[in-house]
Image: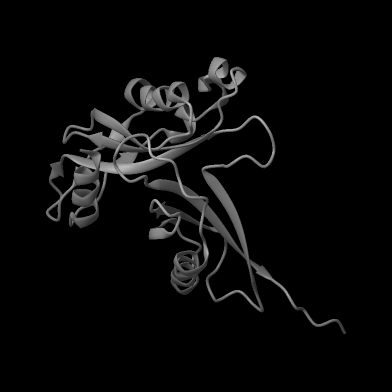
Amino acid sequence: MWLIALMMLQAAPSMPPRWLNEDVVIAPENTPVDALRRGGHGVVSMLARVSADGRFAGCAVTETSGSKELDAASCALLEHKARFEAATDATGRHIDGAFLTGVSYTTARGQPSAVIDLALPVERTPPGYIKATRTAVEFDESGHVIRCVVRRPSGSMAADAAICRHIVAQVTIKPPLSASSEPAQAYRTIVATLAVSGAVEE
C-alpha cells in the first residue's frame, strides 16, 4: 500500500532520494500527445520508490489527472527515463527510499499546474534575500498543506521559513482526486517571490 510507504517516508530520519534529471524527463518531447488530443489534462502526483542502488523500484499515483492514460504515462516516464540518487540514512549509508513528485499536462490557460507561482508583498526584503524560494509542498485529500520543504533557498533563512509558514497557513488547492481506495495526496512546486510594495513616492 502506497500510504504505508508514504508514512514511512515522512517518519524516516534520512535524506530522501533525488531525481537527477527532472528537467530532461519533464520535457515537451516526452509529453503523451495522443492522450492530450483525446481530452486528457490535469496534474498527476506520484510516490516514486527508489532502491538503495539508485534504481527505480515502483510508482504509485497518489493524485489522478482523471485520465488513466496520463497517469500511466507519468509513471512510465519515471521508470524508463528518470535517473536517481538513492536515499541515505543518518550515517550516510544508501537505503531504499521514496519521494513525492508531480507533473502537469495542460492544453489551455487556467488548467491546474504542478508548479504554482506565488508573489508575497513585503515592505522590504530581508538581508541576504537574492532570489525566489522554490518549495516542495504536499497536500492532503482536502487540499490543505501537510508539509512544506525548501528545495532552493532564497539566500535568507528567515525569508524561507516565513514563506513556508505562509504556505502552510494560507495556501490550499482544489481537493485532489484519488486513483485508488487510498486517500489522495497531492504534490506541488511553489515558487514564492517577495515583492516589495508600498514604496513612498517623493
Expressed as whole percent of the image width and height from the top left, the position of residue 111 reads 62, 39
Furthest toward the right, the residue is: 202
In percent of the image, x 49 and y 64: which residue is there?
A: 167
The foreground one among 19 and 147 is: 147
**Which quarter shows the N terminus?**
top left
What is the quadrant of residue 200 in the picture? bottom right
Quadrant containing the C terminus in the rendered view = bottom right
- Return the x and y of residue 136 as percentages of the image width and height: 42, 52
Which is more toward the observer, 54 or 6? 6
Q: Is residue 57 left or right of residue 162?
A: left
> Whole-percent x and y of residue 148?
40, 60
Q: How many marks?
A: 0
Q: How is the image coloured?
A: one colour
Q: Residue at the front extreme? A: 181
- In this picture, is 179 found above or below 7? above
Between 37 and 80, the residue placed more toward the observer is 37
Say which residue appears at 23% left-offset and 28% top-offset: 55
Q: Is residue 113 left or right of residue 60?
A: right
Instruction: Identify the residue at horizontal 44%, vertical 41% (top origin).
Output: 177
Residue that appears at 43% across and 22% down: 73
| Quadrant of residue 98 within the rendered picture | top left
Relative to residue 149, is residue 178 depicted above or below? above
- Between 104 and 88, the one lying in front of the other is 104
State whether residue 24 is above or below residue 92. Answer: above
Residue 115: % across, % down: 54, 46
Whether 158 is drawn above or below 59: the answer is: below
